[in-house]
Amino acid sequence: MRTLVTDLAEIAERVQAQRDEFDVMRYRLQLDDGLDDAALDTFVEALVAPIVAAIDCTRCGNCCRALVVYLEERDVARLAEGLQTPFERVLEDYVDVEAAHTVGEWGAFKHKPCAFLRGTRCGVYAHRPQTCRDYPAFTPEFRWMLDDLLDGAPICPIIYNVLNALLDHVDRLTASS
Ligand code: SF4
Ligand code: SF4
C-alpha cells in the first residue's frame, strides 16, 4: 500500500502533478468493455476500507469547509430535533432553498464553511444530514463516479489516497493491458 498522505496542501500539489496519470486511469477504467462494474465496485470497496479506517476525519473537516451540502426535508427535521429548535427556525437560519432549487435540490446549507463545524469536528454529528453521512461515496458504479471523485481528490484525503492506491492496480484490472 502506498504511504498515506493527509496534508491538504501536499495533496493539492500532488493532484495537480498527477493529473495526467489520473486521467489515463479514468479513461482506461471507463473505456474497458471487459471490466465488470460489480467486480470493480467490490475491488474498490476493499481498497477504500483500510484507507477510511486509517484517516481520522475529526482531524480534517475539509469537506465541511469546502463543499455545498445538499439537504432533504428530513435532514432539516433531524437537525431541528437535535438542536431542539423549531423546524422553521432551522430552515430560516441555515438553509437556502431558492439556490438549491436552481440545481434541482430541495435545500442546501447557506454557509460555507458549514455553520455547524467546530474546529475540524462536526458539532451536530448525531444529527448531521445524509449527504454528510454518505461522503465520500465510491460506489455503486465507481467507474462512472470517477469524474466527480477526481474533482474531489484535491479537497479530500480519503478520495486522494484511494485514487492514488488504485493506480497500482489499473494494469491488472483492465483487459486491454
Ligand atoms: S453538518 Fe457536520 S458533517 Fe455536515 S457539513 Fe456541517 S459540520 Fe460537516
Ligand atoms: S471525508 Fe475527506 S475531506 Fe471530509 S473530513 Fe474526511 S478526509 Fe477530510
Image: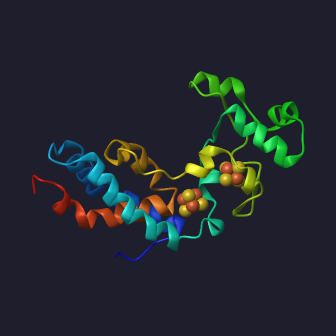
x, y (%) of residue 44? 35, 58
Rendered view: 96 above or below 5 = above
Q: Quadrant of residue 118?
A: bottom right
Front residue of 6 and 177: 177
Give how far across and how far down residue 7 sits, in percent.
53, 70
Color scheme of the displayed model: rainbow
- Whether residue 109 is visible, yes or no, is no
Q: Nearer the viewer, residue 129 or 102?
A: 129
Res. 168 visible in picture: yes
Using the rendered view, name the quadrant where residue 18 is placed. bottom left
Tell me which residue sits at (45%, 66%) in the image.
49
Asked which quadrant contains residue 102, the reply is top right
Image: 175 above or below 60: above
| Residue 158 higher or lower than 77, as above or below | below
- Residue shown at 42% from the left, 51% from the top: 138
Q: Please count the marks in the image.
A: 0
* Quarter placement of the N terminus: bottom left
Q: Which quadrant would the C terminus be assigned to in this image?
A: bottom left
Image position, residue 175 (x, y; %): 12, 53
What residue lies at 35% left-to-right and 75% top-to-bottom?
2
124 on left or right of 177: right
Q: Answer with left or right where residue 55 lies relative to residue 159.
A: right
In the shown orientation, is residue 81 left or right of residue 154?
right
Residue shown at 46% from the left, 72% from the top:
5
Percent coordinates x, y for residue 86 in the rendering: 89, 36
